[in-house]
Amino acid sequence: MHTTFLSLALAGAMLLPTLALAAAPSTDFGTPTAVTPAPTTLHRLQSSAGKTFTMAEYTVPTAHAVPHILAIDQNDAVWFSESGGRFARNFIDVPAQSKIGRIDVGGTMSEWYLGDAETSPMGIEFDKAGDLWITERLANRITRFKRDGQKVHYQVPTPGAWPTGLAIDPAGDVWFTGTKADKIGVVRIKTGQVEEFALPAKATMSTGIAASPDGTIWIAERDVNIIGKFDPKTATFTQYKLSTPSARPCGVTVDKTGTVWFTERGAGKLGRILADGTVQEFALENRQAGPFIIVADQFGQMWFSELFANSIGRFDPATGQFEHFPIRGDNAHPAGLAIDSKGNVWFAQQSTNKLATIIRADLGYVGGEQRVSQASPADPVADALKGYRYDPMEIPTTDSLPGIVNIDKRGTVWFTQMGGGFVGPGFPPGPAGSKVGYVRDGKLHELAMPTPESGPTSLGLDPVNDDVWVSLRAANKIARIRNDQVTEFTVPVPDSLPVGVAVDSKHNVWVALSDGNALARMTAEGEWRVLPLPAPNLAPRTVFVDHEDLVWFAEKQGNHVGLVDQQKWRVDRWKIPTRMAWPLSIVEDEKGDIWFAQMRSDKLGVLDRHTKQIREYAMPVNSAPFKLSYDAGNHAMWVSTVFGNAVMRFDIPKGEVVARYPVPQDGVWVGGIDRDADSCFWITEQFGNRVDRLCIDGVSKPLRAAKAD
């Protein structure tokens, strides 16, 4: 499908569209009491199933905050209650707190004081309007923290009720457990009236509460071994007595099918209640693990915190299998969990005062497609084990998240150090990077950008001279590296998120402005011209200049590849057949056809230069092809695969992957790729924090490995 669009920009030296290209930063919830950078600490760990996973951790600035329950807002920022201690005998004996915290995608932690000392906020949840509701245990109230910064308090009628759990029903009414009152309560959203309903049992110490899609309320009555069901229409309870003695149910949730799930902290089990009222239980291998809070992901997998096992658990109802993800260190006492839009599993570490996330390595989650990883179609790994070698070089800056690789005419290997906070699956919140790395004469060096935490993201090499260009996404700039000196240039579109960068033979620098929804060109004289794209939210991420100086681009969200008509200042676009393909890399072959990696759909695509038809080729499922390197001599496309954890060789005549070369360490997330004069490949390990040289028998010349200084 082919479409042509004219730009609305006018002629001139600096051409800016009259429409706003980027939204202003949000000022929701008023001014925080404190704002603190939260550096990211990354760990590569192994689950009980032997799978490598990445966990990112962030320390809460307030000492002894005891982060407890989590909620995620519409921007994927993670909010948490800072409850402090003294809510259970002999457990975390520190003073109660009175704060709500938030970590945003940039790794900044903001904290809001709730106005009174030691109120001990516990449950939190967002309503449809985006306001945050909070139970304050020791203040005996429910608080509505509005987006304009106002805090509206609703006092619980029963003194000393200890409001703890919180749930919002489909009508918007806010339900809570009165843990010491043996009641549940509700704040009527239309009137602000608070009502309470006495539970049938006494001394229940009820905590967890959940609302079904039909408005039914479910309660974990911990100390009496009951899951309660409340019908708001009739104000009646149905009690489900658990058969396991001392099960102590704590967490309760309802999955998207309407099935009720709960944890049995005392018995080391999960349970569910079927539509006919049948109660089923599933025992963990470790009956002392203390399953606590439970949530469901969109695939129906149940995730839960293991309070006493220092782990996060996952249960697959389809297979009945458990998998456990250990937390680094000891005695974290994980509590609240929440799952963001990318499928990353966030949790609170009460005793170590941290937030953490298990990063999901599956882009199918974004589109609601559950996929199973598989080997390359040829599965040639065993045949190649003695035929290739990786030589890694450690990057001095920790957790730098190295990204794109380019090799210049002199053989210098350049790579970006992106840092955290890049919007997209897999990039944990954290400060943006500040450096570009390079390997020259066998030694690794780092070059600081003038603007700290500017987020070096993509690279472009001038085809005529030795200039290296870098996009600085967090600073809204691009930078030129000349003779190892850095000069920065501000992009004229505010908050544009510059990502892709490329240079033509006239020294024009082309930039893909992802949030600006535009392409931009800066001439050798420093004059800018902006080309807005024809529809909103297309998210151009990649720009490429071919051998004829034609400028191509790819839209991550718009799902098109396009060509800039530089004379008429407009774009031609071609729709990619597979929906949500996420094209993130462009190269050309010897015929001039345009190849691109489809990261989310696990495919390669090629646009025929003459017919403008797109063909697609399957890659291994959940391999996440990222960057491409064309090899004319071997009629191959070399592909870095993020989740495949390997470089793969795609045979163009055969139209399939014929070899893959796994990185020695699992879970490193292979990033950029480029080929040097000896046909060895340089790649980055994003979570391994290394840049590697891959030499392959029959493709590369065997050379002495480079060494870092």
Image (cartoon, rainbow, N blue to C red):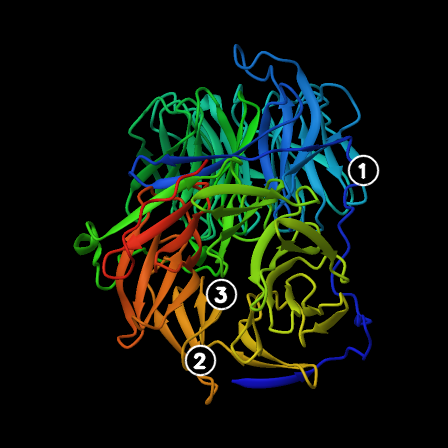
Query: 477 or 266, which is in the foreground?
Result: 477
Q: Earlier in the sequence, mark 3 or mark 2?
A: 3
Q: In the orientation shown, which residue stands out farthest toward the bottom? A: 611
Amino acid type of the residue tagged 3 in the rendering: Ser
Do we see residue 472 in this rendering? no
Q: Earlier in the sequence, mark 3 or mark 1?
A: 1
Residue 237 vertical placement versus 92 (above, below): below
Three-letter amino acid code at disc 1?
A: Thr
- In terms of secondary structure, where does tag 3 sit? strand
* Residue beneath the point at 82% across and 71% down: 18
Residue at the disc numbered 2: 593
> Residue 657 placed where, x, y %?
28, 66
Helix, strand or loop under label 2 = loop
The disc at residue 288 is none
Residue 285 in the image, given as x and y percentages of width and height:
28, 29
Which residue is the site of mark 3? 585
Residue found at x 46% / y 37%: 55
Q: Is residue 189 above or below residue 161?
A: below
Q: Are marks 1 and 2 in contact (CB under 8 Å)?
A: no
